[in-house]
């Protein structure tokens, strides 16, 4: 929108003949924006159109972003409303959104600082509970769920070894594979020594669950889902979707069903959070603070950078 506004504002006929802006110019611009330093390239190549079609567009066949080889441009029908160019207004909204996003990010950092200093363990636990919400931002939910699961599983031990004589006691360890929203092939967390895969997701599109299973060649996945629904309800809905997509073919049904190791929802996370010790709660807060700071790009303020 920024590039369009500078060159084609109120010039619809010229814009209709335009073949697009170079991807590298758009990408470099995105990287300069607040929070854009570590953004993944599929944000433009796929995620933008997919999210727009899922949540906004009344005509999902009319993509917001037109990809013309190495060049990109926005569909003109989303720029003009009743023959009025709305790009000025859209840019103002985007600037305001970036400002509000920055302020929200800074508030959570401040809240975490205060939470670290808090001495009342019940207040700490309740504050984390409040952050576990269906409406919470996806990246925040992923970080909080990781912190809780890491502390929860570290208290569980197994006995493992290459032979009967070499069996030893070992506690479970959970590792985060990268930044949130990374193109990681469907693996958000990995557990050692069991080698379990965890994928954080939402309920909105069960097709994505099947895609995650396909991407890891049907290695069993534990889905951590941002929902207050009972996990048995999720399991039933997912099984029904698998049945629908399989056309009743038992081989396909078995492949997908065997790929689901466990379903974890907000309900389980809250139950486990209540079971954790004061020391574990402090560790959770420190982990949330650490990974949230890694996630953020603090240098850039809420302004569109040229």
Image (cartoon, grey):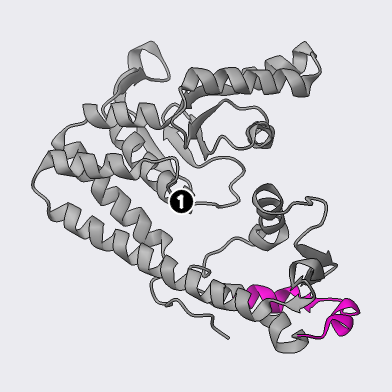
Q: Name which residue lies at 35% across and 61% down.
A: 293
Pick whichever, 35 or 172, lies toward us: 35
Q: Position of residue 14 (x, y in %)?
A: 87, 84
Q: Quadrant of the N terminus?
A: bottom right
The residue positioned 46% from the left and 51% from the top of the image is: 139
The dominant secondary structure in magenta is helix
Quarter of the image that includes the C terminus: bottom right
Which range is magenta?
A: 10-29
Q: Position of residue 8 (x, y in %)?
A: 77, 85
- 98 falls in the magenta region: no
Q: Which residue is mark 1?
A: 139
User: At x 69% / y 23%, what residue is drawn?
Assistant: 241
Quadrant assignment, res 280:
top left
Q: Is residue 119 visible in the rendered structure shown here?
A: yes
Residue 264 in the figure: left or right of residue 271: right
Q: What residue is rendered at 48% in x and 73% in y?
A: 96
């Amino acid at each position: 929108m920024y590039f369009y506004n500078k060159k084609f504002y109120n010039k619809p006929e010229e814009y209709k003949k335009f073949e697009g802006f170079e991807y590298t110019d758009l990408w470099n611009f995105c990287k300069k924006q607040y929070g854009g330093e570590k953004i993944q390239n599929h944000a433009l190549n796929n995620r933008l159109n997919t999210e727009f079609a899922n949540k906004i567009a009344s005509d999902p066949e009319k993509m917001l972003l037109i990809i013309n080889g190495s060049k990109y441009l926005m569909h003109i029908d989303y720029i003009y409303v009743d023959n009025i160019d709305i790009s000025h207004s859209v840019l103002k909204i985007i600037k305001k959104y970036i400002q509000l996003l920055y302020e929200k990010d800074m508030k959570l950092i401040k809240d975490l600082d205060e939470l670290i200093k808090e001495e009342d363990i019940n207040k700490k636990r309740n504050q984390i509970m409040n952050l576990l919400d269906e409406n919470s931002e996806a990246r925040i939910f992923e970080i909080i769920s990781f912190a809780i699961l890491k502390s929860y599983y570290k208290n569980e031990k197994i006995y493992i070894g290459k032979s009967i004589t070499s069996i030893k006691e070992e506690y479970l360890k959970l590792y985060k594979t990268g930044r949130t929203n990374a193109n990681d092939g469907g693996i958000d967390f990995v557990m050692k020594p069991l080698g379990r895969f965890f994928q954080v997701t939402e309920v909105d599109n069960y097709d994505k669950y099947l895609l995650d299973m396909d991407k890891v060649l049907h290695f069993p996945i534990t889905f951590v889902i941002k929902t207050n629904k009972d996990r048995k309800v999720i399991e039933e809905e997912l099984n029904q979707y698998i049945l629908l997509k399989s056309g009743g073919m038992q081989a396909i049904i078995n492949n997908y069903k065997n790929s689901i190791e466990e379903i974890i929802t907000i309900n389980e996370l809250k139950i486990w959070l209540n079971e954790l010790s004061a020391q574990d709660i402090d560790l959770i807060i420190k982990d949330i603070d650490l990974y949230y700071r890694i996630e953020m790009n603090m240098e850039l303020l809420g302004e569109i950078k040229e």
